[in-house]
Amino acid sequence: MTENPGIASVADLLAHAHAMESEAHERYLDLAEQLELHRNVEVATLFRKLAQIEQLHVRKILDRVGALELPHLSPWEYRWLDDEAPEAASIGEAHYMMTPHHALSLALRAEQRALDFYSSVLEGGGNSSVQELARELAVEEREHVELVKTWLAKYPEPGADWAEDPDPPVYQE
Amino acid sequence: MNTQTVSASAARAYKSDVKPVWCPGCGDFTVLSAITKAFAELGLPPEQVAVVSGIGCSSRIPAYLNTYGFHGVHGRATALATGLKLARPDLTVVVASGDGDGFSIGGNHFLHACRRNVDLTYIVMDNRVYGMTKGQPSPTTEPDWDNALTPGGTGLRAFNPLVIALASGANFIARGFSGDPVGTARLIVEAIETPGFSFVEVLSPCVTFRPDQRDWRNAVRPAPVQPTGDIGAAARRLMTDDGFNLGVLYVGSRTPYQTHRTAAPVSPSEIEQQFAV
Amino acid sequence: MSEDSAEFGNVSIALTGSGGAGVITAGAMLLDAAARAGCYGMFVRSSGPQIRGGEAAALIRLSMQPVEAQDDVFHLLVGLDWHNIERFAVELPLAANSLVIADPANGPPPEVIIETGARIVEVPLKDMAKAVPNGRPNMVALGLIAGLTGLPEETLQAALAKVLEGKGEKALQASLAAALAGLATSAGLEFDRRLPAATGHEKSRWQISGNQAAGLGAIRGGVRFVAAYPITPATEILEWLAAGLAKVGGALVQAEDELASINMIIGASYGGTPALTATSGPGLALMTESIGLAVASEVPIVVIDVMRGGPSTGIPTKSEQSDLNIALFGLHGDAPHIVVAPASIGDCVFTANWAVHLAESLQVPALVLSDQFLGQSRAIIDQPADLAFATQRLTVETVGDGYRRYALAAGGVSPMAIPGTPGGQYTAEGLEHTPRGMPSSQVTDHVAQLDKRRDKILGFDYGDHWAQITEDVDSDLAIITWGSTAGPVREALNRLRAGGRTFRLIVPRLLAPASPQRMAAALRGVKRALVIEQSHSAQFFHYLRGYFDLPCPADSYHRPGPLPFRPGELVEQIANWSAA
């Protein structure tokens, strides 16, 4: 596990947590809209549900923030482990014919990255209140991971021909 | 709480309620998101921003934004944006294009936009293919890429847009990758903040016609160099570049081109006097 | 057949020379002197393909009446030399009573001159110039012409002083001395075309070219942004505007090509600044795709096409009315737009101004069809009236939620949000779109927007500006013409009227949208019509036949450039037609 010593205060960690949950929420909404536009209703509905769950997480973070003043961070000032906020499902992995199995696998990877992030904060040391908060958030995130795993178990991996489309792409402009 | 941290929502305010027609998985989604993040970061009022485009998948972007926009004809976006910016220097003008629109049919305008160095930000989403017309090779396509229009590949060397931009006088040259949304947002912020013509190539995979480009994720890397203002060093850097180095690769200090407006205009009837007998 | 109007005071002069002889400068000075003397006049330059040093001719017509055409013959030809005069011969018709001034230093005049039967008089122009320190033969010729045509010495002096301003007192004195030598020599020569002394005139006059006039009209109309690519014969509009716009607070940008210039003006106009470009046929061809964009996205722009001989590179330095079809029909799709044409040099001011007014009012591209003859000829005219259109683009100041840029408003013109207007954000769209501007391929949207773009143009009140209807409105014979051809037609009809034959003359300024009802009203009572134009394929005639319900049999007289119409040619054609 990569250490993440950069998170120095509760406000800083909450800023990250809030950004992470917000981005996750927005990303699921984006994916839901994409799949709706491509008439993949089943997966779109699933992404909408995931978005709703993330919205609840955003609210929970905001409850923790309370009256605390959070620092302003530019997108590139967040100390994520990877290229972007960890809980945002990787948008480049979407496919118009993706199945719930793919969608939930995508979500699982995102939740796992979120858990990894909090774990990295824990391992990075920092003051006790940061540690305490990171531990709580990690616990919650682990619950999410387990939840998605259970959900995913209901959708076995589809056959190799899942993306087969008998029709060609459409000429546009 | 401090509302400034609500970056995702702030960025979302720059999106319109029109849903993109791009294929799920397309890199352009991330570029759209990076553009909105950049606008949010710069705190630009949406009515003070105009996004101009031509034709192609990437050129659909203006409709997806809550700024002013112009979806024009194929290849002429930089020219249209030049007219807009010169007439309205108060606006932030961003041009969105693709490799076909920007480098093939719009090639001449690309040269002259770099040369003219008007204060524009030119974002080209490069997927090395024409998507809207179903997968033909563009100027940046590899010579051996097989397709229906040029079976067996074009046999033509790919065009190096960053080198062309440098040679033509662009003042800011950067490369981003759609798989790196934060980095791309940062490049766009810097491009907008840098006076003059800023060129940002964003590698943006086409999942439908170039599924092989999903591997770009493993090919890209942060450029192992700092931005330079030394045009000779930049030229060497760009000429030897494999196309996958990300970051700001050149920042010059050319003064942007502006049209000068007299502070004391006279009335048309005054200039008519020159014709009086 | 031709019956010219010597009794009014009317003389046509050609001054030829090559290789730096300075005939064009001398011609400009002559026109300026004539303007000061109270004459009307027109100055046309004709030159070879060389950028410099080639053969050139200054063709000047002076009259006590307004001049809109070259005359049938030149009454006076002054040859500084005869190099390659053969290529001009067909442009320089001479009659037996024409006077040719030849310099014996150039040897005998060429056969093409001698065979005209014109009276040839030798004057040693070069030797006379040599007699003056730093004297030049073109100035001797200028003085000679001024003397022969009766221009007062002081007008010549003033013209020299104006043109040579900045060349220094020495140069001015040398030129003046040479000109006075020529003037003195004229006294001993017989010439029956001397202009009467002007008696003063009420209207103030201008000396202006059609290209300058079009530029001025654009500025009067409110144009403050121009993007352009140089092209003959439109470049003078752009060069004049570059300086003119700088004074009135606008700007001109030189684009990399016409594809860029048209898009730059669309961008500027989208930003709220009335914008224009000027070009000629090849440039217009390149612009047509984007003019269609301006139609679809409803962005007002003005494009001036100074027509030249076509197709392809054609004859860049000569006039032709052969871009009518591309201006009317060159856009793909159903793309309603405005096409207007000035009917004289002075009318270039009005028509360009009107084009801006129409474009801005209707949020549509307006094409102005001028031509090389109007554009590059310089004339002394009565000062054109300033009609001061109250041009105002329909915009929105404050916008609530749900702004619809392409709303189906009554009359078809929907308010435009200018960037910077909060809440007005929209995407100007070249794809077919919904009232909000969202791309749409739905039949209802397509039909609604097609109707909108058509109706706003058809429903507009163009008033009496749509055409000039003059001469004898009671006549049951009508002549229909357009653009620069109207000038020689008017002069031909004047001559015919002097012979007791009258015609109704209709010169439409508004070429698109087609206005068949207006034309039918103008033709009420007409039994036959003759359509006259400078086009090999009779484009205007076929347009009228196709889109107007001509309530009378119509015939066509048409021919291509490069030779201009002369009144005598048209008198003959019209007389034969009316007698048939």
Image (cartoon, rainbow, N blue to C red):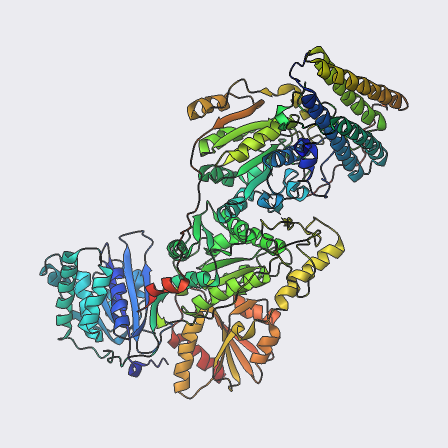
Name the quarter where the C terminus of chain B is drawn: bottom left
C32 w.r.t. A140: above or below: below
Residue at the left extreme?
C131
Q: Residue at x 74, y 14 (%)?
A: A119
Location of residue C239 in the rendering, given as x and y in whole percent from the top left corner: 38, 54
**Height in image: C94 above or below C449?**
below
The foreground one among B228 and C454 is: B228
Query: Which residue occupies 40% across, 75% down?
Result: C569
Residue C375, visible in the rendered structure: no
Q: Is residue C246 left or right of residue A22?
A: left
Work out whether residue C61 or residue B51 is closer to the camera in this orientation and state it.
B51
Judging depth in this view, the residue of C567 and B87 nearest the camera is: B87
Q: Residue at x 43, y 66 (%)?
A: C349
Looking at the image, residue A2 sits to the left or right of residue C6; the answer is right
Residue B114 position in % (x across, y down): 48, 36
Pick the quarter of the image with the N terminus of chain B. Answer: top right
Q: Position of residue C578 (x, y in %)?
A: 48, 83
Task: From the viewer's side, name the closer residue of B42 and C548.
Answer: B42
Count of numbered marks = 0
Question: Can residue C113 be seen from the camera position used here?
Answer: yes
Q: Is residue C148 above or below residue C431?
A: below
